[in-house]
Image: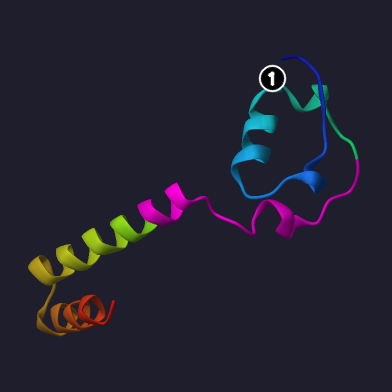
Amino acid sequence: MQQAIIDLQSCYGTESPYVMLLQVTSLEGLAILRPFDKWKIQCQQSEDSRRETRRLDFLRMHTIIQHGNESESASAQMILSNS
């Protein structure tokens, strides 16, 4: 899409603004309808994003347990046992 007018203030989460902005091929073709609060497009991660973040944290902790020094491994084990 060469041109688009978007309303970021009406967005919720991070996916819809991303998809809207992705449609425009250049900044010259982008018009933002009205001022928007930055938190509107940063406040809510999708469930998929939260799940992926948890999965990556879990993998990071297991990597530290397997390959970190004794102190790092102990800390990672404690973090995993508390979650």
- Which residue ends up furthest to the right in the rendered image? 34
The picture places residue 75, in percent across and down from the top left corner, at 21, 83
Q: Which residues are magenta?
A: 34-52
Q: Is residue 35 left or right of residue 43?
A: right
| Coloring scheme used | rainbow
Residue underneath mark 1: 25
Query: Does the magenta run of residues contain 73?
Result: no
Where residue 71 sits: x, y (%)? 15, 85
Foreground residue among 55 and 66: 55
- Disc 1, SS: loop
Residue 73 image position (x, y, % from top left): 14, 78
Q: Name the residue: 44% across, 56% down.
A: 50
> Eyeballing the image, is 15 above or below 52?
above
Q: Residue at x 68, y 39 (%)?
A: 17
Give the quadrant of the N terminus.
top right
Task: Place residue 39 in its image quadrant.
Answer: bottom right
Please, what is the three-letter code of the amino acid marked with disc 1? Answer: Thr
